[in-house]
Amino acid sequence: MSEEDVLIVQVDSAETSRGWATLGPRRWRCTVGEGGVREDKVEGDAATPAGEYPLRRLYFRNDRLVLPKVRLPARPISEHDGWCDDPRSATYNRLVHVPNDWSAEKMWREDGLYDLVVVVGYNDDPPEGEWGSAIFLHIAREDYAPTKGCVAFSQADLLELVPLLGPTTKLRILARSAAEEAAPSEGAERKQFEDFDEKDW
């Protein structure tokens, strides 16, 4: 798998949910969960899970947008589609018919956030414990407000991105922010002073 087929998501700093998603030479503004990016995500913590995951399929509102040609499996969302977020259910982290006896997030929304959804293969093969559910790429609010754990983009950017995603594409969510990676370590700072020579002035 080449880096050209890895969608890399990284927040700007530990103090913000905003970041960038990069695929090959292209990049798009995005936002992540209000709980930050965590390697130990659990159900209900509003965190985005760090790690590398496959992309499963797309769901979309065909009454609101025209889906471009895509390589992932895709189907329209119906009014009775939901996503089970109840770890006690045998359908945990699965598409379900709503209403039913278990807690589920409605996929048919008025706010437009799920007009286009890419399902991330997180905790789904099979779903286990309470490690979280319903991790998607979806449409962001206009102000790029934090999500409940998903990665969100503007509608225009997500429509531009989805044709580039295929069955072999991986989503890599980095635990360290861009600011943390850019900051020199204490050891590096010390070495910089050790290497200093007045003759360089």
Image (tube, rainbow, N blue to C red):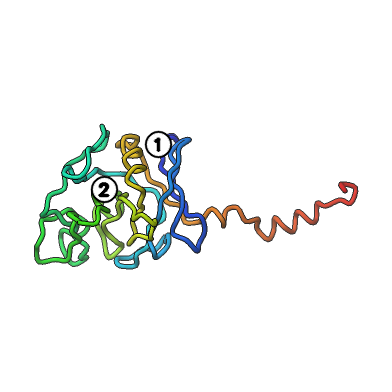
Estimate the x, y position of residue 170 in percent, counting from the top left: 37, 42
Label 1 crowd (10 A; few <14 / some 14-19 / many >=20)? some
Q: Quadrant of the N terminus?
A: top left
Cβ atoms at labels 1 and 2 below 8 Å apart? no
Of labels 1 and 2, earlier in sequence is 1
Label 2's element? strand
Residue 32 image-quadrant placement: bottom left
Circle nearer the viewer, 1 or 2: 2
Q: Is residue 9 left or right of residue 96?
A: right
Residue 149, label in figure: none
Mark 1 → mark 2, Cα distance in angstroms: 19 Å
Identify the amino acid type marked 2.
Val
Label 2 crowd (10 A; few <14 / some 14-19 / many >=20)? many
Residue 183 image-quadrant placement: bottom right
Q: Residue furthest top?
A: 69
Q: Is residue 57 left or right of residue 200?
A: left
Q: Is residue 115 left or right of residue 190?
A: left
Residue placed most toward the observer, 82 or 173: 82
Which residue is drawn at the image coordinates 12% and 49% (left, top)?
78
Estimate the x, y position of residue 145 in percent, counting from the top left: 38, 60
Estimate the x, y position of residue 128 in percent, counting from the top left: 26, 60
Residue placed most toward the observer, 36 or 20: 20
Q: Is residue 3 above or below residue 180?
A: above
Q: Which residue is mark 2?
A: 117
Estimate the x, y position of residue 55 in percent, counting from the top left: 30, 44
Which residue is drawn at the image coordinates 45% and 56% (left, top)?
18
Q: Which residue is mark 1?
A: 5
Identify the amino acid type marked 1.
Asp
Which residue is drawn at the image coordinates 30% and 49% (left, top)?
120
Residue 33 image-quadrant placement: bottom left
Label 1's element? helix
Visible residue check, residue 21: yes
